[in-house]
Amino acid sequence: RIITSYHKVAVTVSQVKSCPMPGVENQYQRCVLMFCEGVAFCRARTLMTIASTEMKEKVDSGQCDLGELFRVYGLLPEFELQEVRLTAEGEAVPGFGRIYRLAAPGLSCRIAEEFAETALNLPGEQHAFPGIPLIWSDFPVTP
C-alpha cells in the first residue's frame, strides 16, 4: 500500500508459497513477490503462528489463505518494528528491508520485507536491475 501511494501506480502481488512449516505445529510460511509494471521490487516472507483452532481449521481446509486471516476475522493487528537494514554500498544486489511483527488475538506474524533499491524509483525505465537482495538469510522462511 505504501508503494502504491508513493508512486500512484498499481502494485500486484504474486504468491510464491503458502503452506505449513515442516515439522512445526501451528506455524505456517508464506512468501510473496510484489511487482510494479512487471518489475519485481519486493519479497515478503512471513512466519505465521496460529493459536486459534478455528483459524487453523479454516487454513488447513483451504477455506482461507494465510494472507486473508486478518481481514476475514476483522482483526486490526498491533505492529512492532523489529529491525531495519540497508545493504552495504557495493554489494551485488543493493536494497533495504525491515522485519516487523503483526499480532492479534489467535494470530501472530513475523514478516521480513526485502526491497530492491529500485523500489524508490518505480515506475520507469529500469537499467541493469540486479534483483531483490536477500538481506536476512537466516530468516526461517526461505524465498
Image (cartoon, rainbow, N blue to C red):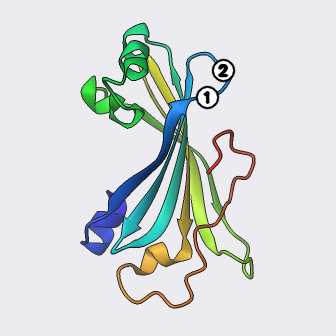
Q: What residue type is labelled 2?
A: Val
Gap between marks 1 and 2 measured at Cα: 6 Å
- Residue occupying the point 36% across, 70% down: 36
The image quarter in which residue 52 lies = top left
The image quarter in which residue 97 lies = bottom right
Q: What residue type is labelled 1?
A: Met
In the rendered image of this protein, does residue 25 appear above or below residue 21?
above
Other residues around mark 2 within 10 Å, as few (<14) / some (14–19) / many (≥20): few
Q: Where is residue 9 in the image (x, y as percent from the top left)?
A: 25, 71
Mark 1 sits on what residue?
21
Mark 2 sits on what residue?
24
- Residue occupying the point 35% across, 80% down: 123
Q: Give the secondary structure at mark 1.
A: loop
Q: Where is residue 56 in the image (x, y as percent from the top left)?
A: 43, 16
Q: Where is residue 53 in the image (x, y as percent from the top left)?
A: 43, 8
Q: In this view, does 72 lie to the left or right of 85?
A: left
Q: Where is residue 89 in the image (x, y as percent from the top left)?
A: 72, 79
Residue 108: give its label: none
